[in-house]
């Protein structure tokens, strides 16, 4: 269990060394470190999740070439990119980055951004991508993936945060136990879009 707590601290980017954790409860830190990889392997957990921010930038650069963008359209594409970054921010709060590759997440973000700004003919751009590449996937498969990504974002932002009062108290107790409460300010609220 200590190894799981140690792993959770890494995942939440709240670094607590194994030595600190072991000292806090009078346990050998080597036990925690020896079991760490076993826990990750048993969960089939990958420690890296690739974010789609660079893919958004790459697609914007590709769109500039694809549409032979002039100065006016370059500014509009930059606006499209900024809005797409906000869309990616929303996606990163869902399970979508664990289920879909960064390129598909970027295309979904750009598609949603383009729906707001109407900068380009997005379907034409997607067809252009498929005409240039020998892809194993079809346009309809990509459309299904983009729709699924949108569904993840919509569902995750429409649900009420599932934290109950007891869960909040439990998390605060763990943070006290780890000795990190002084560094963080917690307010437990229900988040809605």
Image: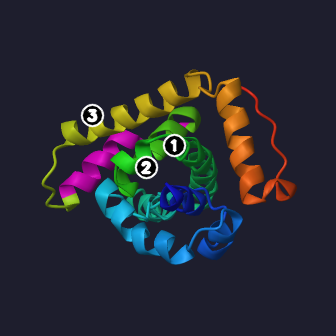
Where residue 108 appears, x then y in whole percent?
42, 42
What's the magenta region? Answer: 118-131
Q: Which mark is residue 97?
A: 2
Where residue 111 appears, x then y in whole percent?
45, 40
Q: Residue at x 63, y 76 (%)?
A: 19
* N-term mark: 1 or 2: 1
Give the Cα separation between the discs numbered 1 and 2: 7 Å
Task: Examine the rendering and report whether any part of residue 38 can be seen.
Answer: yes
Return the residue nearer the eye: 187 or 76. Answer: 187
Task: Examine the rendering and report whether any part of residue 69 can be seen.
Answer: no
- Helix, strand or loop at label 3? It is helix
Q: Which mark is residue 117?
A: none
Return the residue nearer the eye: 74 or 28. Answer: 28
Q: Quadrant of the C terminus?
A: top right
* N-term mark: 3 or 2: 2
Majority SS type along the magenta span: helix
> Of all residues shown, which one is farthest toward the front?
26
Q: Is residue 69 above or below residue 93?
A: below
- Helix, strand or loop at label 2? It is helix
Q: Which residue is mark 3?
A: 144
Q: Is residue 190 above or below residue 57?
A: above
Q: Is residue 131 above or below residue 91?
A: below
Label 2: how many residues lie within 10 Å, few (<14), some (14-19) or many (20+)? some
Give the Cα separation between the discs numbered 3 and 2: 16 Å
Q: Which residue is mark 1?
A: 91
């Amino acid at each position: 269990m200590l190894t799981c707590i140690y792993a959770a601290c890494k995942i939440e980017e709240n670094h607590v060394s194994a030595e600190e954790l072991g000292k806090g409860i009078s346990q050998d830190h080597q036990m925690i470190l020896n079991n760490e990889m076993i826990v990750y392997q048993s969960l089939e957990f990958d420690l890296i999740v690739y974010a789609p921010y660079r893919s958004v930038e790459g697609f914007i650069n590709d769109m500039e070439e694809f549409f032979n963008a002039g100065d006016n359209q370059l500014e509009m594409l930059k606006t499209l990119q900024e809005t797409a970054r906000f869309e990616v921010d929303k996606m990163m709060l869902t399970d979508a980055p664990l289920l879909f590759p960064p390129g598909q997440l970027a295309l979904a973000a750009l598609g949603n951004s383009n729906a707001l700004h109407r900068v380009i003919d997005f379907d034409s751009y997607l067809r252009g991508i498929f005409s240039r590449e020998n892809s194993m996937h079809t346009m309809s498969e990509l459309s299904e993936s983009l729709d699924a990504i949108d569904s993840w974002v919509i569902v995750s932002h429409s649900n009420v945060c599932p934290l109950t009062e007891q869960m909040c108290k439990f998390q605060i107790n763990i943070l006290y136990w780890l000795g990190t409460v002084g560094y963080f300010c917690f307010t437990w609220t229900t988040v809605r879009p």
